[in-house]
Image (cartoon, coloured by chain):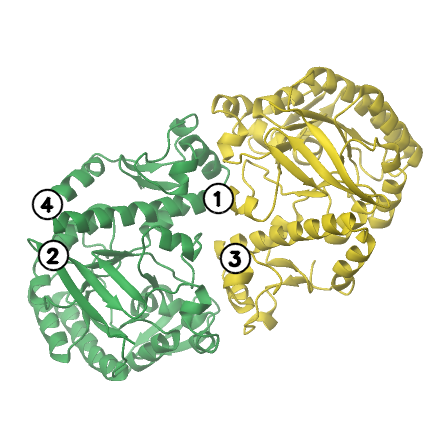
Chain colours: A yellow, B green
Amino acid sequence: MSAFRFELTGTDGAARTGMVHTPRGAIRTPAFMPVGTAATVKAMLPESVAATGADIVLSNTYHLMLRPGAERIAALGGLHRFMDWPKPILPDSGGFQVMSLSKLRKITEEGVRFRSHIDGSEHFLSPERAMEIQRLLGSDIQMVLDECPHFSATEQEIEKSLMLSMRWAQRSKTAFGTQEGHACFGIVQGGVFPQLRKRSAEMLQEIGFDGYAVGGLAVGEGQKAMFETLDATTHHLPVDRPHYLMGVGKPDDILGAVLRGIDMFDCVLPTRSGRNGQAFTREGALNLRNARFADDTAPLDTACRCPACRNYSRAYLHHVVKAGEIVASMLLTWHNLAFYQDMMAGMRTAIAQSRAAAFARDFLAPYEKNTETD
Amino acid sequence: MSAFRFELTGTDGAARTGMVHTPRGAIRTPAFMPVGTAATVKAMLPESVAATGADIVLSNTYHLMLRPGAERIAALGGLHRFMDWPKPILPDSGGFQVMSLSKLRKITEEGVRFRSHIDGSEHFLSPERAMEIQRLLGSDIQMVLDECPHFSATEQEIEKSLMLSMRWAQRSKTAFGTQEGHACFGIVQGGVFPQLRKRSAEMLQEIGFDGYAVGGLAVGEGQKAMFETLDATTHHLPVDRPHYLMGVGKPDDILGAVLRGIDMFDCVLPTRSGRNGQAFTREGALNLRNARFADDTAPLDTACRCPACRNYSRAYLHHVVKAGEIVASMLLTWHNLAFYQDMMAGMRTAIAQSRAAAFARDFLAPYEKNTETD
């Protein structure tokens, strides 16, 4: 089994392009990871997800530990086999979702006790258990357990939370141990405070990780604060390790973050929007519910090669969205993921050709005047 | 454009196998037609429907006339192009669904006035309008408008309704006129009364149709009465025209009807069951919600080559059904349609080899002891 390795092949300013090598295949960076919450990228078959250009998917430790259970998935041969996705999988550590979805959560030094949002049953997640679950799933990239404070917390509260997350990061890394071909990523916290972000980045490097995520952003602070925080963070991260911005985002969030040194992204936006009748296109975001599409014979996006664009009119997509048909979710999810992957591919090429900023500006132009997304 | 033509290639008792030739491709009979109500076979892409072996799909005049509208579909290039299904389409005439779904319906000699179940708007469907709508859709096989009395109606009521349906059949045929490459089917009514069925069959043949449907069955009369009615009906239908049993049914309904001379079927059962977590397999019908599948590493049906069976365990299907994931509807619909098409293919071969009854008996054996379907 070959080792986990990050290969940087080009830079353009702070933007980087390269390849994360794993035994389950390479991940071209900058990379967008579709979210497969409950062992499925909603409304998609895995071969379709791969056909859009995805090299890796995210899954959610919190959801899978509650249903169907990590030990069960391990007994069934691991998550890749369970969900029929042979390429790399990165599960989050469960921290963010425990904080936001579960009931009656109680955080202590040891970990977090909470009740399932499904059946109210009580569970406990510690750094050690979070890593054990990810190992049971067979995760290629494993994430440390961190605490995710609310973005409106004070600097003192954020600092206190950060120090807990750093102790949990050390315990997570110790629990991860050494796993040939698998990687363990630390998560930089520190809210929108540059000094805390710097300190977090340095503390994580003292522990030593295979990659570094930036957490606690895209939680309501706004794009300007997010970009400023990235500007104050990414240059404190090691150049020779992938940088992953968790839970981001809209096309302009992603391209702006790539220009600031981020290599990996995940977000529910393209999949969730697709299920809600929203499409990202090269003309901007479109709401297919809009009556103006009822007689529109044009394809959704003439430059896209996904089935929704190749085989159907906007009029058809409008019809199936209005009728609440499952095929609307299937087609618009496929399209949105294809659009996101095309965007990443375009950005990778642009970085290699030293025209990253120009590509981002041109690609995002339709989104500046866009009014149709919620 | 070649003509519509039925080619009978083999018989075994009353059972027949052959081919309905149309300009859009041949339909191997006995044929099962998946239902694509609102211009989509729910939870499936058309190429997947074709991959299961379907040669033709049904669509619903009632649904399409209300949304998005027949004139709109015509302006968009017809239903085949709209829904990306290049093979034959058979829309029902709307009669059955107007009777069962719409509000405030009022039937007169002229036609039926009703309110849409979607928005309450008022509409009128006459034999002439039903045929016009089907022509606007671009239907390959067009169905006459008929009245569908409740199965508990008296013989007098059924007879009165039948005579109206026969007058409507004449008007439908006149409205259809001559359309090269397109076919017009009459619908035999008459409830469970052999004399009425015979009379209906004879009256329709006096008008002259390209195919003959049997309507008004599978509406609550039970399988025994349905089979007795078929026994009293199909030998009154012309041998050189396809016989279509509308809205049927479970595997044993279908194979029993094939043994009684039926060539074509449609039913929502495989698609609707799939969305409800029910699978038809060679071991009988299975309810994937059942907890006994939670750790079952076996494929759904070892003899099936659909993606659900090739790529996943029953444990996975159980998980996605329980989690309410769209992929559960996608996979189980695909499987159920593949199972139905495999059943029809097996029956076609069996008829050609003069072992139709034995095939039906063996194939249905697991269904006799089956307890898991609702």
Residue occupied by mark 4: B355
Determine whether the residue tagged by mark 4 lies in a helix, strand or loop: loop
- Between A10 and B31, the one nearer to me in the picture: A10
Asked whether disc 1 touches disc 4, contact meaning CB atoms under 8 Å apart, the reply is no
**Are tags 3 and 1 found on a single chain?**
no
Discs 3, 2: same chain: no
Is residue B196 positioned above or below A337 on the image?
below
Quick check: can you spot residue A186? yes
| Front of the two marks 3 and 1 | 3
Cα separation between marks 3 and 2:
39 Å
Sequence-earlier tag: 2 or 4 = 2
Report x, y in % for residue B286. 33, 36
Q: Which residue in the structure is indicated by mark 3?
A: A307
- Label 4 crowd (10 A; few <14 / some 14-19 / many >=20): some
- Please name the amino acid that badge 2 sits on: Gly
Q: Is residue B192 left or right of residue B145?
A: left
- Tag 2 residue: B10
Left or right: where B1 falls relative to A296: left
Residue at image position (90%, 31%) is: A198
Q: Residues within 10 Å of mark 1 (few under 14, many from 20)?
A: many
Dot 2 and dot 4 residues touching (CB under 8 Å): no
Asked which quadrant contains residue B177, the reply is: bottom left
Tell if the residue under mark 1 belongs to the same chain as the one under mark 4: yes
Label 2 marks which chain's residue? B
Residue A39, image quadrant: top right
